[in-house]
Image (cartoon, grey):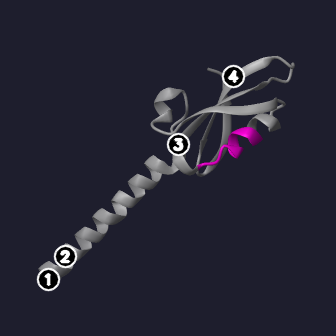
């Protein structure tokens, strides 16, 4: 392998790694709020409304390691009382309800 080929391979590796990092870090920006709505509806909540979205480091804000976004949802719980919950989600998983 000559110097030029080695340099191209290293540049390609850097581009691929940066692309993967950007995809993982920014994937919470393109996940739809419909994930949060479907999750709370499937768990007996009604009249859901997404009031906030956290895509930067949701793992440090109450979500799990595989989550890339946290939605704050206001809805009526199964008992009919107003509730505020978080729905944590990621690109390869569904939503998980967490109570703040």
Q: Residue at x 71, y 45 (%)?
A: 34
Q: Which residue is mark 2?
A: 6
Span highlighted in magenta in the image? 31-38
Q: Which residue is mark 4?
A: 84
Task: In the rendered view, tell whether residue 78 sits above or below residue 19.
Answer: above
Disc sitting over residue 2 in the figure: 1
Mark 2 → mark 1, Cα distance in angstroms: 6 Å
Q: Position of residue 30 (x, y in %)?
A: 56, 51
Tag nearer the camera, 4 or 3:
4
| Quadrant assignment for the C terminus | top right
Q: Residue at x 81, y 31 (%)?
A: 47
Instruction: Give the secondary structure at mark 1.
Output: loop
Q: Residue at x 16, y 80 (%)?
A: 4
- Circles 2, 3 touching at the beta carbon (< 8 Å): no
Disc sitting over residue 68 in the figure: 3
Mark 1 → mark 3, Cα distance in angstroms: 41 Å
Compare residues 81 and 51 and report the one nearer the observer.
Answer: 51
> Of label 1 and label 3, which has the lower sequence position?
1
- Circles 2, 1 touching at the beta carbon (< 8 Å): yes
Compare residues 55 and 51 and report the one nearer the observer.
Answer: 51
Left or right: 75 in relation to 9: right
Left or right: 13 in relation to 66: left
Residue 76: within the magenta? no
Q: Position of residue 87 (x, y in %)?
A: 65, 34
Q: Position of residue 93 (x, y in %)?
A: 63, 47
Task: In the rendered view, tell whether residue 1 sits above or below residue 95.
Answer: below
> Of label 4 and label 3, which has the lower sequence position?
3
Mark 2 → mark 4, Cα distance in angstroms: 54 Å
Mark 2 → mark 3, Cα distance in angstroms: 35 Å
Tag nearer the camera, 2 or 3:
3
Instruction: Give the secondary structure at mark 2.
Output: helix
Q: Position of residue 19 (x, y in %)?
A: 39, 60
């Amino acid at each position: 392998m000559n110097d030029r080929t080695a340099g191209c391979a290293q540049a390609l590796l850097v581009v691929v790694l940066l692309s993967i990092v950007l995809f993982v870090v920014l994937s919470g920006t393109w996940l739809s709020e419909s994930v949060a709505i479907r999750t709370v509806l499937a768990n007996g909540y009604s009249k859901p409304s997404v009031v906030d979205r956290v895509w930067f480091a949701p793992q440090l804000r109450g979500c799990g390691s595989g989550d890339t976004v946290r939605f704050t949802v206001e809805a009526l719980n199964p008992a009919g009382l107003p509730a505020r919950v978080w729905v944590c989600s990621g690109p390869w998983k569904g939503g998980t309800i967490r109570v703040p």
